[in-house]
Amino acid sequence: MKLIINDATTLKSSFPIREHKGKSFIALPLDYTILDIETTGLDFEYCEIIEVGALKIRGGEVVDRFSSLVRPQNQIDDFITDLTGITNEMLESAPTFSEISKDFYNFVSNDILVGYNINFDVNFLYDAFQENSLVFSNDFIDAMRIARKILPSLEHHRLSDISAYFQITNPEEHRALSDCTTTQLCYSELRSIILQKYSEEDFANLFKKTKLSSKSIHTENNDFDESHPIYGKTVVFTGALKSMKRQDAMQIVADLGGINADNITKKTNFLVVGSEEFASSVKNGKTDIIEASVECLPFLDNSFDKIITVESFYFWPHPQENLKEVYRVLKTDGTFLLVADIYGKDGLDVQILENIKKFNLYNPTPDEYKKLFENAGFIDVKVHIKEDDNWICIEGHK
């Protein structure tokens, strides 16, 4: 039996399944609405919208604007104020989202939406509109996807990176309407570059995916670490991966001596599940999710052969004690894998350092990770690092 710890302190029994959410697609329209929001954080369940902005575009020109601060239920912290310039005093007299929801909904109407990393904004707005009995189902175009395709040589593709590339000044970065204006200018520049090289249809075809087969993944490595937990194991990927392309993930498996497969069989050792398929499997009753705190897992001692947590350890409330709780429910000879996309070291990206501070992330060094595991009782602890991408995997046994 395997236990997958998906979240920082809980294994959530429910998560948003946005049944009527619009589709992301690639096109280069001239009529649309640019959208941006500011929030108190990244968590759709606990964080709140504090500002909305939108520009209505017709024929490539701005014809109308919508902008409003939004009063949250809770006070915002100093980090958000430093990031956005929005203060608690500014929000005291602002309307709630419920009070502006109908006006904003009518402004957006049934337009195609364009934004930067807009899936984030759409998810927050979908939930907020739903709380006000409004169905938010507009299809949307992510300008960041377009930027990545057209400007692949850039190291990063944040809105600030693209605006700097085009020498566009954003006077109020991280304010909704100013970010909308910057996104509109960047989208226009990208659109102009694209149409010099492609027809709109040909450009959209660049994003069409071909089916990836495990048989197409090969490795030149012949010096494998046979003690690695992936070595000799069969791995199946399904669904969209958040942090990397599936082909890249499959290549890592092959380079570690693992066996990629396209279908689940009795020989499958690890199933890596993308979010959409995972949600479907829960809805269809194929997967059980138990909500609990990592501080007190609701399982008997020695319950699981394998336990995996990916990108959650930074949020654990009491890391050392929580690791002991994981150790308790792991079977003798069982394996625990902790995977994270950051770890304590010199030279971390400024954006990563900002996120560590913003979300109060726990970020040990490799040596500290190993000591934490050993202090929790794990034996034969190994630390695997992919230095170029900041990934770390700590492997512990019982």
Image (spheres, grey):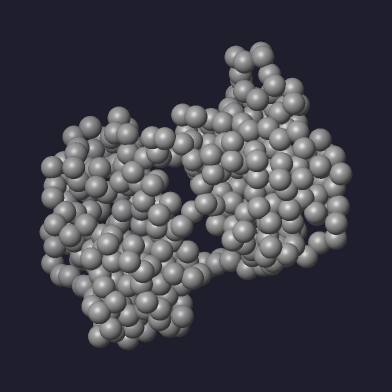
**What residue appears at the point 37 percent right and 77 percent down from the top-left corner?**
75
**What residue appears at the point 46 percent right and 77 percent down from the top-left corner?**
130
Q: Which residue is at the front of the view, 19 or 200?
A: 19
Q: Is residue 40 visible?
A: yes
Looking at the rendered structure, the number of numbered marks drawn on it comes to 0
**What residue appears at the point 66 percent right and 52 percent down from the top-left corner?**
320
- The answer to whether residue 225 is above or below residue 324 is above
- The answer to whether residue 49 is above or below residue 260 is below
Q: Which of the image's four quarters has the C terminus?
A: top right
> Where residue 90 sits: x, y (%)?
23, 78
Q: Which residue is at the front of the view, 2 or 129?
A: 2
Residue 233's quadrant in the figure?
top right
- The answer to whether residue 9 is above or below residue 259 is below
- The answer to whether residue 52 is above or below residue 274 is below
> Where residue 33 sits: x, y (%)?
25, 63
> Where residue 307 sits: x, y (%)?
73, 48
> Where residue 362 sits: x, y (%)?
52, 51
Q: Is residue 147 left or right of residue 132?
A: left
Residue 93's quadrant in the figure?
bottom left
Q: Which residue is at the front of the view, 88 or 195?
A: 88
Q: Is residue 284 visible?
A: no
